[in-house]
Amino acid sequence: MRQLALSLGERSYNIYIESGLLSNSALITRYCIGESVLILSNDVVAPLYLEKLKSSLKDKNVFHLTIPDGESFKSLESYTKVLDFLIKNSFRRNDTLIALGGGVIGDLGGFVAASYQRGMGFIQCPTTLLAQVDSSVGGKTAVNHPLGKNMIGAFYQPLAVFIDMQTLDTLPEKEYFSGFAEIVKYAMLGAAEIKQLFETKLSAIQQRDPEVVAELIYYSCAKKAEVVSADEREAGSRALLNLGHTFGHAIERLTNYQHYLHGEAISIGIMMAMNLSKEYGDINNETYAFYHRLLLALNLPVIVDKPIAVSDMMSTMKLDKKNLNSKYRFVLPKDDHCFITELQASELIEQSIAKQIG
Ligand code: NAD
Ligand code: GLY
């Protein structure tokens, strides 16, 4: 079993990575505080993995609640539904909520756990590649508001993260590759082991070789843990994790969150960030070409295939909650790391966007 720690003083926790981990009763039970456990899942994941997890918790008073699948259920309505369930079943602060699912369930479950009786035990069991390498680690939790994504939330760290890579076996191809945009991001942030795996094991990755994927998940979590433990609440350097996201979020928004999966929009956003970096002369041609080829090899889009106007991208990016003052905030890649910069609107930014619009 692979294991690593996210160091945050008394909020430190372990991340475990292993195929079949959901059946590791002794380990999972050890982290469940209290008598009662609520497993929160959705109607796609529950039929696949709920029974497995339930049978690992035989010594506990186990409840489960399933919400419908989809980003639209990462909502205040779902949040209220889970709270109602906890109250009606007399859950206490020192009981545990386990999120079993992708980023939607993890973000929703985390926010419920953060706020129920001012904070109950919380465990992440992520089942998508995106959730395994990104959303289950680092303690960002949220639900959406009709006027904006992730508008209501909290920083709330789990007690542990259990990554069972066997759950990836049922993940559709498109969802699988979408998770790779975040893994590419960690390579660009300086995770040399990930870059090396992309250089040497690309065809195994394309064929979903579990050993190589486990290594990628491990090094991704390690990079995320390093960044989060240095800046838990994003006062500064954690914003590096937003590489490609200023552009990507605008693409998602302008296509009504219907056309691209999150990772797909981030892939195009990474290209736009590389364009901007190239204009400044910071990224060399070889690095640019390597990541361009890599994104394509991972079945990720690099060009927007919808009629989006550059001016709409600029005005949408202006609304990004990570901007400071009147400037745009970007994470730009150099050759083996990234840096954060704030820029006024300019033709350079517009050209960096236009280059990736088909
Ligand atoms: P998701 O949770 O919607 O899962 C994607 C799809 O895969 C869903 O249809 C889901 O039912 C299905 N699924 C999940 N596991 C499966 C499995 N093992 N087999 C078959 N199908 C499975 O989406 P996601 O991409 O995991 O997460 C996206 C969400 O994560 C967004 O809401 C985003 O805002 C959030 N997010 C949060 C953070 C964070 O730091 N908290 C970071 C990145 C993204
Ligand atoms: N996904 C970005 C972060 O966790 O900060």
Image (cartoon, rainbow, N blue to C red):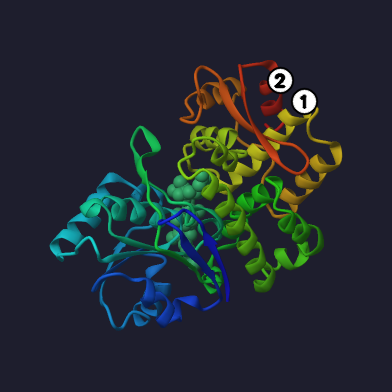
Tally of marks = 2
Q: Residue at x 29, y 83 (%)?
A: 59
Position of residue 77 relative to residue 316, above or below, is below
Asked which secondary structure carries label 1, the reply is helix
Residue drawn at x 54%, y 41% is: 238
Mark nearer the N terminus (2 vs 1):
1
Q: Which residue carries the number 2 mark?
A: 348
Q: x, y percentage for residue 272?
A: 68, 33
Which residue is at the front of the view, 68 or 272? 272
Where 28 falls versus 300 (above or below)? Answer: below
Q: Quadrant of residue 11?
A: bottom left
Quadrant where the image shows the C terminus: top right
Q: Is residue 222 visible?
A: yes
- Secondary structure beneath dot 2 equals helix
Q: Please tell me which residue lies in front, 77 or 344.
A: 344
Specify whether 121 is left or right of 28. Answer: left
Q: Are marks 2 and 1 in contact (CB under 8 Å)?
A: yes
Residue 332 is situated, as x and y percent measured from the top left of the image, at 68, 34
Q: Is residue 113 left or right of residue 133?
A: left
Q: Position of residue 78 (x, y in %)?
A: 28, 51
Q: Which residue is mark 1?
A: 279
Left or right, 337 with respect to 19, comes to right
Furthest residue toward front = 9
What is the three-letter code of the residue carrying label 2? Leu
